Image: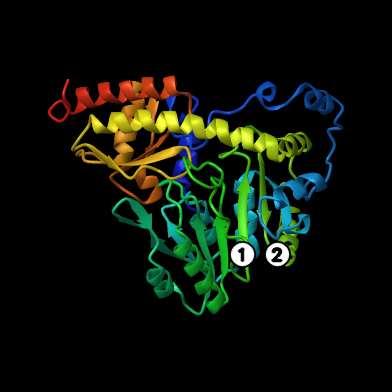
Amino acid sequence: MRIDLFELERSQSIWENTVEYNLTESGLHPFTLRELLDAREIEALLELPLGYGHTEGEPALRDAIAALYPGATADNVLVTTGSSEANMLAVMSLLDSGDEAIIVTPNFMQLPGLAKALGAKVRQVPLRLSGDRWMLDLDEVAGAITLKTRLISVCNPNNPTGGVLSPEERSGLAALAARRGIAVHADEIYRGAELSGPETETLFATAPTTVITGGTAKAMALAGLRIGWIVSSEDIIEKAMQRQDYTTIGSNTLGQRIALYALQPEKRARIVARNRHLLARNLDQLSRWIATHPGIFSWVPPQAGAMAFLRYDLPVSSEELCRRLRETQSVFAVAGSWFGMEGHLRLGIGGEPEHLGDALLRVDRFLQEEFPGRVAS
C-alpha cells in the first residue's frame, strides 16, 4: 500500500526529543498522576488487573465520554488507542476505493493521507483568513461535492490555526451534508481547550451521519494515556469495532481507568480551568513578543488549542527556517508547509511559561544572527 509521508509526525518523531525547546507540541503541559488523582484513586489503580479488559472500552468510561456529547449513549462510543487510531478507524469505516472525500484544510493532515491510501480521491477546501478569523466558505464546500463524495472532514477547533467554526458555519455544513447524503467527520480533539468563552459545540448528531473523534491528549493534557474515542451512530461504531479487530484490538486498561477518573465532571472542570489559565499566560507572553517584531510576524490569535499559527515575512522557506532554528538554537517549530501553508510557523503555547519565554529569546537570537537587517538588536 502506498502512503504519503506524514511530514509533521515523522519530523516530530525524529527531532522532538533531541532539542532543548520543543515548540511543536500542540497539547498542554502534562499532568502527573499525583497532580491528577487523589490517594483513593491511586490506591485503586494498584489493585487493577492488567488484562485485556473491555476491548471496546470500559462501560463506565464509555458512559463518561457519551456525557460530553448531548444525545449520545455508551452504545455510540468506541474507545481507541489515541485519537489517531480513532481517525483511522473512522476513515476506514466511511470510505472505499473510488470514493471522494472533502477535507477542510489546513488540518492535522492525517485524514488526507489515510483517504488517499485507501484509494479515495481527496478534494481540499481551504479555510480563508478574513479579518480577525479563519472562515469556511460553504459555497466552496458545495462546489467540491460530486456524486462520489462520501465524506466531509473538519478539525474543529482547528489545528493549526486555533480557529473555531461559527454557529452559522456549523449549521450550514450540517445542512449541506444532510441534503446530499454525505457523512460529516469532525476531529474535536481540541474541544475543551478554548482560551475564553464557552466550550465549542460538538457536531455530533447535527446531520444524519456524523462521526466525531476525540481523546485525552490535547485539551486534557493527558497524551501519555493514549486514550481516544469515536462517537457516532451504532452502525458506524459496529463497523469501526470490526476494523479495530485488525489494528490494536483495544486500548490499554490502565489508561482507560485513569481517563475515567479524569472525565468525572468535577475533575474535568479543574483540568480545563488549569489549562485555560496556562494558555492565557502564554498567549499574553506571545502576543507581546509578536508586537516587538513588526513586519516579520503577523497572526490571528487562536480561539482554542495550545498553538499559535504565525505568518512570517522572511526570505526562506518554512521548512528551511525550522531546520536552521533547530540546528543553531535547539528550538523546534512546525513548518507551515507541513500543513500545505508555506510562509507560516506553528508554535506550541501549552508548555510552562518560563520554557516558552526562554525559547522566544532563542528565536530572537536566531533572527538577529540570520537576518540582522530586519531585527533591532
Residue displayed at 60% across by 47% down: 84
Say if mark 1 contacts mark 2, CB within 8 Å.
yes
Residue 262 is situated, as x and y percent measured from the top left of the image, at 69, 36
Judge whether residue 331 can be spotted in this image.
yes
Quarter location, residue 221? top right
1 or 2: tag closer to the N-terminus: 1
Q: What's the amino acid at mark 1?
A: Thr
Which element type, helix, strand or loop, lies under badge 2? loop
Q: What's the amino acid at mark 2?
A: Ser
Residue displayed at 43% across by 19% down: 354
Residue 270 versus residue 78: which sits nearer the camera? 270
Look at the image and tell me in which quarter the N terminus lies: bottom right
Q: Which residue is mark 1?
A: 210
Q: Which residue is mark 2?
A: 233
- The reply, left or right, for residue 47 in relation to residue 317 is right
Mark carried by residue 375:
none
As drawn, 23 above or below 127 = above
Judge whether residue 1 can be spotted in this image.
no
Residue displayed at 49% across by 45% down: 197
Q: How many marks?
A: 2
- The reply, left or right, for residue 348 in relation to residue 72 is left
Residue displayed at 69% across by 36% down: 266
Give the crowd class for mark 1: few <14, some 14-19, many >=20 residues within 10 Å: many
Give the crowd class for mark 2: few <14, some 14-19, many >=20 residues within 10 Å: some
Residue 140 is situated, as x and y percent measured from the top left of the image, at 38, 69
Which element type, helix, strand or loop, lies under badge 1? strand
Residue 129 is situated, as x and y percent measured from the top left of the image, at 32, 55
Cα gap from disc 1 to disc 2, whole angstroms: 8 Å
Report the residue that reaches farthest toward the left: 373
Look at the image and tell me in which quarter the C terminus lies: top left
